[in-house]
Image: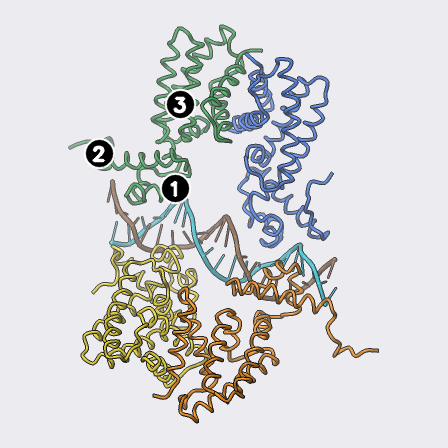
Chain colours: A yellow, B orange, C green, D blue, E brown, F cyan
Amino acid sequence: MTLRGEMPRRADAARNREHVLGIARAQVASGDDSLQLNTIARLAGVGVGTVYRHFPTRQALLEALAAEPLSELAERAETAATDADSEAALHELLRYALNRILRDSCLAAVLESAELEDPAVEKLKNRFDKALSALLRAGKRENRIRKDVRPADIRSLLCGVAHALQASPHTPKHARQYLQILTAGLTPS
Amino acid sequence: MTLRGEMPRRADAARNREHVLGIARAQVASGDDSLQLNTIARLAGVGVGTVYRHFPTRQALLEALAAEPLSELAERAETAATDADSEAALHELLRYALNRILRDSCLAAVLESAELEDPAVEKLKNRFDKALSALLRAGKRENRIRKDVRPADIRSLLCGVAHALQASPHTPKHARQYLQILTAGLTPS
Amino acid sequence: MTLRGEMPRRADAARNREHVLGIARAQVASGDDSLQLNTIARLAGVGVGTVYRHFPTRQALLEALAAEPLSELAERAETAATDADSEAALHELLRYALNRILRDSCLAAVLESAELEDPAVEKLKNRFDKALSALLRAGKRENRIRKDVRPADIRSLLCGVAHALQASPHTPKHARQYLQILTAGLTPS
Amino acid sequence: MTLRGEMPRRADAARNREHVLGIARAQVASGDDSLQLNTIARLAGVGVGTVYRHFPTRQALLEALAAEPLSELAERAETAATDADSEAALHELLRYALNRILRDSCLAAVLESAELEDPAVEKLKNRFDKALSALLRAGKRENRIRKDVRPADIRSLLCGVAHALQASPHTPKHARQYLQILTAGLTPS
DNA sequence: CATGAATGAGAATTCATTCAT
DNA sequence: AATGAATGAATTCTCATTCAT
């Protein structure tokens, strides 16, 4: 499965693109999500222009960075949607999603943002929403999920929980705790 | 001869300080939480130096801005802690806190941040935490609140919920919904 | 074996050249006379390299763009030079030239510039000057034209009038007015 | 007579402003009218920010540069308007204006531009126009000036003549010649 | 010949902070 | 205390030109 509709034609260009993406990913992973294009260019050992060619805007880079984890997330969600045990599947999906978001702030940015530039990424998000919607529907049928919860709410709340965890240095135990609070909160009162 | 070290601020200085704070508050309220000291000085009609004198760092200004709402919040919490109906009191307190946070991003910043510069603000936060702790204790006794929840978690989660709401344009109804999810999630499973 | 040095351009190359010229012309006509080779290449759907191959410098492109109108201008001038009514012929020629210059800033650039890269364009300019010279000579003989006016002055003054017109949005009426001022000014006092 | 409504309050700031203006003037005089703010800052030995403080935009700097010559021009025009020999006065004024324009491209820019940022400069231009208008009126009365000529036309045509002269290296004799052509052209046919 | 990716100097602009007045 | 001019590093972004494919 390919993530990009518009791959660069030349092999070296593609390599460059991936290299820049890798550097950017590392930057974000190291806690710097400012995504300064000239810094990334310097670290990647390419000219600024090269970065601008591949990623005309900060948002484009951000979405490109989010594409991979979002793709995996969508896939996971689609698999989960076919699971017989929809409750366990949803919980596991949320756990997985939270961990990805915690590791990758770009994913959060894309999950939260209303407007996406790259239609391919938009599509991935829609796939995730669709699968999530199915899981929520199942939960609502069995009265395990509040009727007023929509996929966008799940996305927002997951990012909110991630935000809460990032306020202070957090442990995996903490993440589990907050996730339990979220899932418990999603059940009808 | 009057005491120098403990002299009250000169009246005009105090007035300046309040004016700058007012302008900064208005800026934040208008959605710009960048707190650029130059801009604030210009809007306040004072020199940058004056702003720097009163607020040596951005963080100092931010805490000064948060002081008032935080003070009210602490007071509310202390009152709530004396309420016979601790469940209702907690819920009402959370509702109030969330609305304040939504209206004032500085409050969120202070509630989340680990390190505060101004001891007076630190003290307010501690008062809030203490009262919150009492409310939580009462809830735990009656098995309405998870044992593993601490005041800092409540603070973080409230900011998380605020973050989730701010991801998209939100309605009061939405805020209520997310708050219900939070409070429901806080009950032991 | 065919001659290499004097081989006609390959058909596709010639087509490319014309296409690039067309795009460039359209750009200039639309008011953008920056002649950015990258932009033109993109609009023409060819690589920058292709544009550079055909037009090594901005000046080369500019002269190529001016060639056609300059050629027509030269032809007109030569025809005018044979006209019995040299006064009317000159006036009509100036009117025509001004309108061309107004519509095509490249023509002005070539008419004004002292140095031309392309000998062919240089030649066209010389043809124009020669014919113009004849018209002026006739005028001087009949004392309708100042003795100190040379073809280069006419060229410069025409561009000056065009410049004056372009300072503000101008009407055809305006153009006629300024042209009258120019032609009246050329008569001996 | 002061040229600026908004003089910097501090003496050193005013000195800085003048110094920057001087450098910019020298740049323009040396034929570089790109007015690059960072280059000027470097040459003036001040920080870029200083230049930006005094001249927020290139246009602001340009107008500031034009203020002085424009002021003198306006004054000259006003004096000329009171001259009994309005014909000679107008000719002398045009001669003076052309020479100033030739020496200072900023003046041309301001005389041509429809929109001015600085109201003080706008005012100077209006003063010039008004005085010019009086001179033209006198000329029209005596049938020495075409009825359809307005101050804006004179400004444009002067800039046009300057443009024509600058096309090639010009001599004072050339300037006189073109000016004669212009003044002769302005008389009714 | 054609391509278009890559380059990187350089221009424009912002802003936190200092310090002379 | 107050002022606000000055600083200049930092950042964003553009574009003419080269060169590997």
Q: In this view, does D96 lie above or below C90?
A: below
Task: Report the amino acid beneath label 3.
Answer: Lys
- Drawn side of residue C14 relative to residue A163, left or right: left
Q: Is mark 2 on a helix, strand or loop?
A: loop
The numbered dot on residue B92 is none
The numbered dot on residue C125 is 3
In front here: A34 or A188?
Answer: A188
Locate the N terminus of chain D and report the quarter of the image it occupies.
top right
In front here: B113 or A35?
Answer: B113
Whole-number angstrom distance, CA of label 2 to CA of label 3: 30 Å
Q: Where is residue D7 in the image (x, y as percent from the top left)?
A: 69, 47
In front here: A151 or B116?
Answer: A151
Q: What element carries label 3?
A: helix
Q: Label 1, on which residue?
A: C36
Bin the neighbour count of mark 1 within 10 Å (Cα to Cα): few under 14, some 14-19, many 20 and up: few
Q: Do labels 3 and 1 share a chain?
A: yes
Number of labelled discs?
3
Marked residue chain, label 3: C
Q: Is mark 1 on a helix, strand or loop?
A: loop
